[in-house]
Image (cartoon, coloured by chain):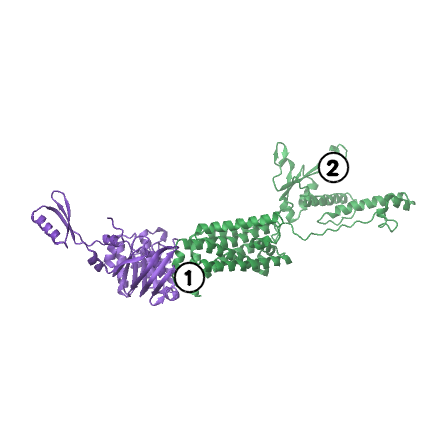
Chain colours: A purple, B green
Amino acid sequence: MISLAGLRVLYGTFAAVDGLDLDIRRGELFGLLGPNGAGKSTTIRVLIGQRAPSAGSVHVAGYDVIREWDKVKPLFGYVPDRENHFEEFTGRRNLEFFGQLYNIPRSRAKEVLKMVELDEAGDLPVRGYSLGMRKKLLLARALLHEPQIMYLDEPTANLDIHSAEVVHRILRERVKHGATIILTTHNMEEVEQICDRVGIVCRGKLVALDSPLALKQQHTERKVDVIRKDGARLVFDMDNAASLADLSVLVAGGQVATMRTREFDFHATFLKLTGLAFD
Amino acid sequence: MRWYIIRALLVKEWQRHLANRGGITLGFLLIALAVLLKASAPKGDSSGAGAGMIGGIKTCFLDYDRNSTLVTHLREHRTAEERQQIAFRPLPKADTVGGYIVYPTTTGGLQLRQIRAEDSATGRATIHISVWHPQGNPTALAPYEAWLWREIRRWNIAQAQVRGITPPPEPEFDSENQWLLTEAHKRFQDQVAAAVRNEEPDFDAKVAVFGAPLTVATSSKGQLVPDLEVKREGLGGDVLDLRGVIATGFIVFALYFTCVYLLPTLSCEERERGILLAQALSPASSLELVTAKALFYPVAGITLAALIAVVSQPVIVTRLFFWLSIFAVAGGFLGIGMTIAAIAKTQRAAFLGGMCYLMVVSMLLLISSLNDIPFLPYFAVEFHAPRILHAAINGRVERYHWGNLIGSAVLAVVWLTVAVRMFRRRGWQ
């Protein structure tokens, strides 16, 4: 559905995206992760036609984003990281205006407001909305024309747990109906929870690409942290026979005060993959 | 170009102004000022010309020492416009400072003191008139003085008729006060003729005494002093029509405000807040977005300007020159506004861009005017705009005004071309 081949975007001499190859399938919820300045937002900007690639090609639904922009434009909905509403209009009026541009009935605005649980606040001016409400209104706007493709830049930032759950549910439903979604986020739990696949970019390059489960399997640290009764802290490697034997002796001798197995930690994995982990 | 998109964008612009009523308030304020300007015009002055200011004098006080038949005559013999401008006031009621009568700025005074024969040192009744004019402008009260001389003469004639005396025929009073000159000359001719009659028969010798300059004109015996004919011609210009100038200022401001201030600042605000991007990512094309803005603001400006013009001068709607002028000026301002909108990245930059443009053009026009620099002002819409709009308002369109109109139209085309090029080059940035 979305294909990036050798994508390279230069800001002067700085390569924000450096030879990115990515294929995202129809009906996939794809998480694009990376530290600040990794090139996620630049990649999204290329996908929404706001930045021309310096090299490489980008195809969406078989159309070249640069050459066939007019065909690409109606296909996607976009949730930016920074809210951009008409502050003086109500939430409903904001949606109705964009609905008019898409030539869809007014009743659709009411539907999407209900979908994001903003129906009660729909007739209030946006300037009175909280950050979370504004974020949900962005999602409502992107859903107006039921796009096949959605690009979401940190869609759950500033949302409370319940609202984040609402967003997750909506995204999963969209995927169930065949939509393709790319989202960028810094929330690792969110990635684990809803993404079908994850791409981790760092310094403009793709450093990992797989499902969260596969990444978990690849990067789970099979280690046990032990605190002895005398207060000493020890780490045992489960893949090392000698280390396992030492742990057994310790347990049998009743010297263990606390013991904890290290589960998969996406956060640590992310830091490790992006080279940002503390030594 | 899809109409439902254009309509949605136009309605959006209007609703944004309804939500933030600053622009609409200013529009109403301009119309209210135009109404006030019209309402305060002298009665019967349907042309809106003049502001009741003759030679910078708005009110001429006629301060008199006592009520008399002369004062009553003067009070009753004023035209409707003179009634607005000449205020009668007893001398004791005049404002004084330190014993001196004070005339505020834009006023002047004619003081009338009537001295009876029994109170006069000479034993003759005397009308003593003092003219208090603005410093350095002794002719500022000339129209009021002309009225005073004429009506005093008429009152004297009326007084003579009451006593059964047949007065001489009334001279041909004229607004330019030439009757005073011709009367004086006629009196001089009569005096010379009387002297000649008394000293006949030595007529030719008398001619020689008056000298050569008169010999050509005294070809017929019996007329020693030639007749005097005075002809006055206007220079072709007009007295400053202050009301028309103010109305023109309102119209130019209305067009400038909508096209060079509102359009760039609100466009840049949308750009700065990312709303323009949201619209650009919708099915609306860049051309449709620009078209909606390029339709809304000039139409709003033209509507506001036309309302102000109609208030000032209702008949203006029938004048083709007015509509051509307003479209040419709106086109020029639209091009300037769009160019600023394409260059400025933020709302503040757009606002400052508009202000800087205005300042640069003002300085350009001022320096060109002070130093008699030719042609340079022709490159500013602001040079042509007031001229053609003022001519349209006062209905005195001369040939050179058409030149100004063509200049304005050419500049509009140039600015619109620049705006389109800038937009193509920079887009929504």
Q: Which residue is mark 1?
A: B8
In the rendered image, residue B59, in percent from the top left (x then y), is placed at 63, 43
At mark 1, the secondary structure is helix
How many marks are shown on the rendered structure?
Answer: 2
At mark 2, the secondary structure is strand
Q: From the image, state whether disc 2 or disc 1 is nearer to you.
A: 1
Q: Closer to the camera, B187 or B331? A: B331
Can residue A221 be seen from the camera position used here?
A: yes
Residue at mark 2 to residue at mark 1: CA–CA distance:
81 Å
Q: Residue furthest bottom?
A: A62
- Looking at the rendered structure, whether the residues under marks 2 and 1 are on a common chain is answered as yes
For the N terminus of chain A, the image quarter is: bottom left
In the rendered image, residue B24, in percent from the top left (x then y), is placed at 47, 53
Q: Which residue is mark 2?
A: B126
Q: Closer to the camera, A274 or A94? A: A274
In the rendered image, residue B389, in percent from the top left (x then y), is placed at 58, 55
Disc with the residue nearer the chain's start (2 vs 1): 1
Q: Amino acid at mark 2?
A: Thr
In the rendered image, residue B243, in percent from the top left (x then y), is placed at 59, 50
Residue B21, placed above or below residue B291: above
Name the chain letter of the residue that bears numbered label 1: B
Q: Residues within 10 Å of mark 2 (few under 14, many from 20)?
A: some
Q: Quadrant of residue A95?
A: bottom left
Q: Residue furthest left?
A: A253
Judge from the rendering whether residue A230 lies leftward or rightward of residue A49; answer left or right.
Answer: left
Q: Residues within 10 Å of mark 1 (few under 14, many from 20)?
A: many
